[in-house]
Every structure is written in C-alpha cells, then in structure tokens.
Image: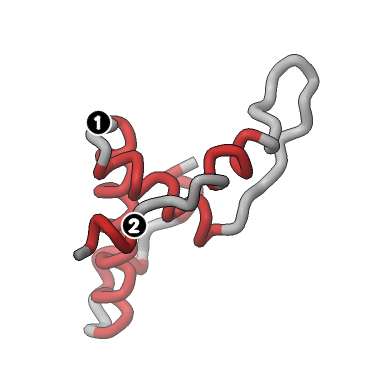
Amino acid sequence: MVEDALQPTKNLCQFLCQFGRGGNNNPIKSVPIDIAADFWTVQAFRGNTKAQALVAACMKEALQRRCDTAFNNSSFVNHNDNEYL
C-alpha cells in the first residue's frame, strides 16, 4: 500500500529538526531531496493542506518539464526559472 511505503521512520522528524530554520541568525542547512520529498509527501497524506499544495505544484511542474522535453513542446521550455523565485 502506498501509505505504508510513505510512512516516515520514527527518527525522520528528529532528523529534520536538527536543521536550522533561518532567523535568529541560525544558518539554513539543506536536506537531501529524497528526504524532503518523503517528508512533504507524508505530511500531505496526513492532511496538511499546505503540504498537499506544495506536493501537487512540484508534481505538476516535474510532469510538465518531462513532457515538454519528451515531446519537444516549447510551452515550458521557454519559461525562465527566475520567474518562480
């Protein structure tokens, strides 16, 4: 079952909590993409609406980029990544 596969390890939250959140002069530390993706996916499955929006937006962008590349569609290729920053 998908939900079982996405269950975080009991130490995932502890692992993520060791990273700075910015502000108060705390340095912002990065986490590996796989861990961040798993964390936000689990949060989305748990009903976090902000996480659901984030996961949906990331999925749409990833699919759009892959389809544009696969089918030589220029609708997304002409976009500048700076538009999203």
Answer yes or no: do the residues labelled 2 and 1 have beta carbons within 8 Å? Answer: no
For label 1, the SS is: helix
Q: Where does residue 17 sit, x and y in percent of width and height? A: 62, 34
Is residue 21 positioned above or below 68 on the image?
above
**In the current view of this chain or complex, which residue is farthest to the top?**
24
Q: Quadrant of residue 62?
A: bottom left
Quarter containing the N terminus: bottom left
**Residue type (three-letter) at the residue carrying disc 1:** Thr
Q: Image quarter for residue 49?
A: top left
Which label number is shown at residue 49? 1
Which residue position holds label 2?
6
- Identified at 25% across, 44% down, the residue is 45
Q: Residue at x 68, y 26 (%)?
A: 22
Residue 69 location in percent, x, y? Answer: 32, 79
Instruction: Give the residue drawn at x 79%, y 20%.
Output: 25
Work out how far the residue at label 2 is from the one at label 1, CA to CA, in angstroms. 17 Å
Where, by quadrant of the figure, is residue 66 drawn? bottom left
Tell me: residue 24, above or below residue 48: above
Q: Which mark is residue 17?
A: none
Q: Nearer the viewer, residue 77 or 15?
A: 15
- The three-letter amino acid code for the residue at tag 2 is Leu
- 56 horizontally vs 32: left or right: left
Q: Nearer the viewer, mark 2 or mark 1?
A: 2
Q: Is residue 68 left or right of residue 79?
A: left
Could you tell me residue 61's position as x and y percent? Answer: 31, 58
